[in-house]
Image (tube, helix red, strand yellow):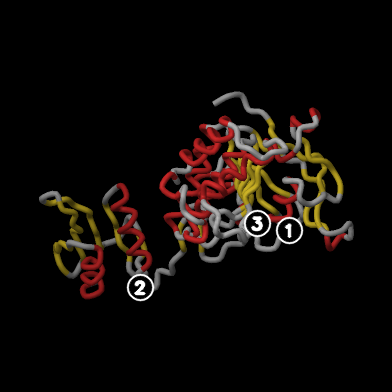
Amino acid sequence: MSESISYLKTENLSLGYSNEAKNVLFKELNLSLNNGQLVCFMGRNGIGKSTLIRTLAGIQNPLSGEIIFPAKEKGIEIEKWISLVLTDKIVASTMTVYELVSFGRYPFLGWNLVLSSNDKKSIEEAIHATQIEGLRNKRINELSDGQMQLAMIARALAQDTPVILLDEPTAHLDLNNRVEIMRLLRKVARTMNKAILVATHELDLALQTADLLWLATNSKTIEVGIPEDLVLNGTLDEVFVLKGFDLKTGKVNHEPHRNTLVKLIGSDYEFLWTKNALEREGYSIAENAEMIIELIHTEKKLGWLVTTPTFSKRIASSVAELLNLLKSKG
């Protein structure tokens, strides 16, 4: 990766609806978006994530402070430096995906609004990067939510700006599409050397894909750090006050209501999913347990060898069979 360069900075930026204390959402923010980074901006609902995105994009004026980007001193328009992806519905629903993506080139067009060969090249590269070649001639009212988000990201890529800001790009998408969008944004940041800021509520995906997190706090500030540090130092717990979810393990906490200890022997994802099932069913995992479950492979098939104080050895051929065996004998 090339040397880290700040593509967008804020100096003592305050924003909100008015200077009355109750209407100030954030105050005196000093933030930086650097090339090659995917930054996820998170916080509780209504705290002002969308307002910050719109302010950084120049749609809404800040209350005080300044937004700085390198091209600003040269008089280059903000739309040639920052592209924006919102969740607003598009009214012209009969336009094609190609036409939608081509709108990314409008800041660069002359008075006659004719696409040059370079403009068309940027559009094609954006369509290829988002892998929506098969959608290019489809009307946008024919697209699924996931396809629409990919088309909107392609429009931003066609705009070919160093900075891309996105407000909840995975809202209302299923898991597969959410993962696809976040992986795409991470790839774009890395391979195209963009600075990408995503306002999102997808905590699990942000922890696994973001280079940095911006965490909106109740004190109208933003804490910045890599995901792992913000988990380990407790900042994420303080911000989200998670109930029943353990950030350190990434799992929902289950009550061990069976009062039965189990020693589990195994490795890899098979061990993790077996442990997940046992804990969900109320068993406690402990090294000194008399009940022992060992993951084994017989004839290239996975099995669970169970030894308990009440019977010697039994083999289950599935997790469901294992749980039924424990309930009947444990």
The three-letter code of the residue at mark 1 reads Asn
- Where is residue 209 drawn, in percent x and y? 51, 44
* Tag in front: 1 or 3: 3
Cα–Cα gap, marks 1 and 3: 9 Å
Tell me the element at label 3. loop
Cα–Cα gap, marks 2 and 1: 39 Å
Residue denoted by label 3: 43
Of pointers 1 and 3, the one earlier in the residue sequence: 3
Residue denoted by label 1: 218
Residue 266 in view, yes or no: yes
Categorize mark 2 by other alpha carbons within 10 Å: few (<14), some (14-19), many (20+). Answer: few
* Tag in front: 2 or 1: 1
Cα–Cα gap, marks 3 and 2: 36 Å
Q: Quadrant of the N terminus?
A: top right
Residue denoted by label 2: 258
* Tag in front: 3 or 2: 3
- Residue 113 lies left or right of residue 327; in this view the side is right
Categorize mark 3 by other alpha carbons within 10 Å: few (<14), some (14-19), many (20+). Answer: many
Determine whether 312 is above or below 108 in the image.
Answer: below
Categorize mark 1 by other alpha carbons within 10 Å: few (<14), some (14-19), many (20+). Answer: some
The three-letter code of the residue at mark 2 reads Arg
Toward the viewer: 101 or 62? 101
Residue 81 in view, yes or no: no
Question: Residue at 50% across / 59% down in the picture?
Answer: 145
- Residue 151 lies left or right of residue 72; in this view the side is left
Tell me the element at label 2. loop
Toward the viewer: 17 or 88? 88
Of pointers 3 and 2, the one earlier in the residue sequence: 3
- Residue 275 lies left or right of residue 160; in this view the side is left
Which residue is at the far front?
A: 112
Badge 3 vs badge 2, beta-carbon distance below 8 Å: no
